[in-house]
Image (cartoon, grey):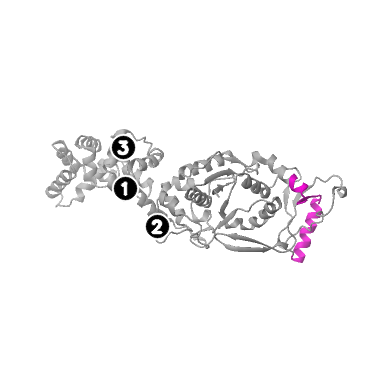
Amino acid sequence: MSVVTRFPPSPTGFMHIGNARTALFNYLYARRHGGKFLVRIEDTDRKRHSEEAVQAIIEGLDWMGLEHDGEITSQFARQDHHKEIAEELLAKGQAYYCYCSPEELEQMREAAKESGAKTFYDRRWRDKGPEDAPEGIAPVVRIKAPLDGVTTIKDHVQGEVSVPNDQLDDFIILRSDGTPTYMLSVVVDDYDMGVTHILRGDDHLNNTFRQKVIIDAMGWDLPEYAHLPMILGQDGSKFSKRHGAQGVHDFRDMGYLPEALCNYLLRLGWSHGDDEIISREQAIEWFDLEHIGKSGAKFDYAKLENLNAHYISEGDINHILEYAAPFYKSRHGIELDDLAIERITKGQDELKSRAKTLIQFADESVFYAKSSPLNFDEKAQSLIDDGQEVLKLLLEGFSSMSEINSDSVKDLCQSIADSHMDGKLGKVAMPLRAAITGTTVSPSIFEACAILGAQECCTRLNAALK
């Protein structure tokens, strides 16, 4: 059997981090088994439908590197076929028309509350025919759920889960206006798409028992299920807005690399021994359903940040700059040119070792991309104002340098410190950093000056003195 998984988000908002993990797990399982990973947009709720949300979902999948197979399917576009299946169920006697008025349904709800019944609909139209239909009521179509016995689902994560059939109602599969319900549409689409394995949140477990009613009525094979535990906040409650970022775009905009987020989400509810750093290739090779935990996993920003720092430190500079480029633009108004990329590349080792996010990487390296005169922050301006004499001595020193490297810059600074600052190197290095970078936070200023070159250092020192 060829494995087929699917990711079926509803386009009503951003791509939630829980959905992102579900997509990742479905992708990895399909890829491990040489199968297909399909994407279906469940867009039947037209009142809440948003094309911007569809685009956000597609962009989120692309950013995470989760390539899908084939075209993205629209559930709404297939509703005529969903109706055909409802009609087939009617013809087979597995579904029936229900003509209950809203008032009758409300009376049933109240009666069910008083009696403590598991379901409220009393199935009064289950065995009646069209000849009994009242005038002026557009009927819904309801499925015939089993009346007795037990339904059992064998789940790869939750184990065997059973529900007494008296807890299953004859739920609606076709509304009175002729539109199919989610419960019908999802079953039909999964069957038509050849889905063999359904990996989704455990909040869908109850839906599985109801969807099985339709599957059994049609005589279709039951997919294999794996219901994933919830992602939790640090307080143990369901991960929500109060716990911080929610969508994939939030983490992108906070400066996380996609491989770091994917690695973290993979380990959030799944394990492979003590391995923490897991490449995409390893994830595809190792991922299985047996090592998904049953309990909800707590989202830990500190662990994610540490993973991100690792991927920045070990990453290819061109890859890092590709994902960091938006931060140079949005935070500093700078497009990286070839000279800036050359300078940043030369200084990459220290820059990468210092950064936990791409924002930090961009902020601490942007001085390589700036041209003189710089805009000095408040602390830098104070150091420049107080260090005019030191900056003049530094300018003289850089102007006479025949060869520049980090050692020669440090020797120059130490010489000035010894002769004018009682040997205190910081009294020279700090004003130099302010003049060269425009800030008081940067990688080694001696290496930075060497990368910029003596001429550029002189240009920046001159601007600071003016």
Q: Depth check: give the residue in front, 146 or 455.
A: 146
Residues packed near mark 1 inside 10 Å, few (<14), some (14 to 19) or many (20 plus): many
Give residue 343's position: percent from left, percent from top: 27, 38
Relative vertical location of residue 63 with respect to residue 217 in this rendering, above or below: above
Residues packed near mark 3 inside 10 Å, few (<14), some (14 to 19) or many (20 plus): some
The quadrant the C terminus occupies is: top left
Judge whether residue 111 is colored magenta. yes
244 with respect to 197 (left or right): left
70 with respect to 332 (left or right): right
Q: Earlier in the sequence, mark 3 or mark 2?
A: 2
Judge whether residue 284 is colored magenta. no
Q: Secondary structure at mark 3?
A: helix
Q: Secondary structure at mark 1?
A: helix
Report the residue that reaches farthest toward the left. 419
Q: Depth check: give the residue in front, 453 or 17.
A: 17
The residue identified by callout 1 is 352
Q: Nearer the viewer, mark 1 or mark 2?
A: 2
Kind of residue at badge 1: Lys
The residue identified by callout 3 is 341
Kind of residue at badge 2: Glu
From mark 1 to mark 2, how far is it between C-alphas? 20 Å
The magenta stretch is 87-116
From mark 3 to mark 2, how far is it between C-alphas? 31 Å
Q: Which mark is residue 276?
A: 2
Q: Earlier in the sequence, mark 1 or mark 3?
A: 3
Which residue is painted at 57% across and 52% down in the image?
198
Mark 1 in CB contact with mark 3 (< 8 angstroms):
no
Q: Earlier in the sequence, mark 1 or mark 2?
A: 2
